[in-house]
Amino acid sequence: MTLLPPDALADRLKAGLLSFPVTHFDADLQFDEARYREHLAWQAGFDVAGLFAAGGTGEGFSLTPAEIDRVVRVAVDEVADRVPVIAPATGGTAVSVAQAQAAQAAGASGLLLFPPYLTEASQRGLVEHISAVCRATDLGVIVYSRANAVLTDATVAEVAERNPNLIGLKDGIGDIEQMTRTYARVGDRLIYVGGLPTAETFALPLLQLGVTTYSSALYNFLPEFALRFYAAVRAQDRTAVYQMLNDFVIPYLDIRDRAKGYAVSIVKAGLTAVGRDGGRVRPPLSDLTDAELAELAALVDKVS
C-alpha cells in the first residue's frame, strides 16, 4: 500500500473495525518474528480497517525503541500492501518525535501518539507535545487521550486547528460529558476511536457521541465474532449487541478483571485458547493461571 494522505487514512480507519495485534515472544521473551508474521497475515485476511503495531495490546510499553522499530518494519513488510499499519510514538517529546520519523521511514501509514510516561503535564504542555510530533512527520496522527494526558475539548480543538495532519482522537477515558463537549466543539474534523479496554463494552453508547470505530482486542483471537459485533453496533442492533455481550463479552470481562494487566494477558491467552499460541507476556504483566485459561477456552468454544 502506498503512503496514504492523512485525510484518506482517516476515511479508511473510521469506516471499519481496528485492532492492535499482540507482539509474540519466544521462550526467552524475545521478539518472535516468525510467529508475529504468521499472526499478522491471519489478521489481515479479514475485513479489518487498520492494524496498530506495538500498541497497548502489543505490549509496546515493554519494548525497547529498537524493538518497536523492528516490530513496525516487520508489520509493514508483512501486511502493509493489504491493511494500513499504524505505528506508535511513545514517551517524552524527543523520543516520540524520533519514533514518528522512524515510523515514516519504515513505511507505516499513520501514527498513534501515546501519553508521555511518568510525568504529569498541563494542557498547554500537551498541546506543544502533540504539535511537535505532528510537525515531525507527514503521517496522519491519532492522539490517545488517557492516563496523564487526558485532553479537554478546548485542547483537542486547538491541536486540530494547529496540525492539519492530526486526524483522530482515541478516547481511553469514557467520560460522556467530555466526549459530548469534544464532538460538539470539533465535529467531524477528527475521527473518534474507542480506546477503553475491551472496547466492545462501550461501543454502542459511544456511537451516539461520534465514536464510529474502536480498537478490538477480541479481534486478535476471534476476528469473525469481533466483526459481527462491530456490524451490529454500526447497525444499532441492540438485541444482537446485548446478546453477544451476554454470551461472551461480559463473562470475558469477569476473567479479565481478576488481576491488573489482564486486559493484555487475556488476549494472548485467547490466542492460545483457539490453538494459535499467544505465548507469554513480558513483566510487569502476568499470565493467566491454568485454571483461568481453561475457563476462557470453554467460553471461546461457545462462540467459535
Image (cartoon, rainbow, N blue to C red):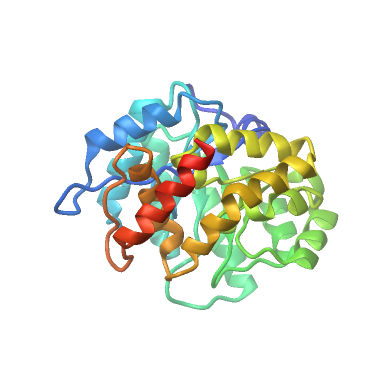
Q: Is residue 245 left or right of residue 180?
A: left
Residue drawn at the location 27% of the way across and 54% of the way down: 280
- Residue at image position (18%, 47%) is 26
Which quadrant of the view contains residue 15? top right
- Asked whether 164 or 195 is in front, the reply is 195
The image shows residue 116 at horizontal and vertical percentages of 47, 66
Residue 271: x percent and y percent? 37, 43
Q: Where residue 300 appears, x then y in whole percent?
A: 47, 44
Instruction: Give above or below for 176 relative to 241.
Output: below
The residue furthest left is 28
Query: Along the horizontal axis of the image, is 85 left or right of 165?
Result: left
Nearer the observer, 166 or 44: 44
Q: Nearer the viewer, residue 166 or 81?
A: 81
Residue at x-position 61% and y-position 48%: 247
The vertical placement of 273 against 108, above or below, is below
Q: Is 178 located above or below residue 233 in the figure?
A: below
Residue at 47% across, 22% down: 82
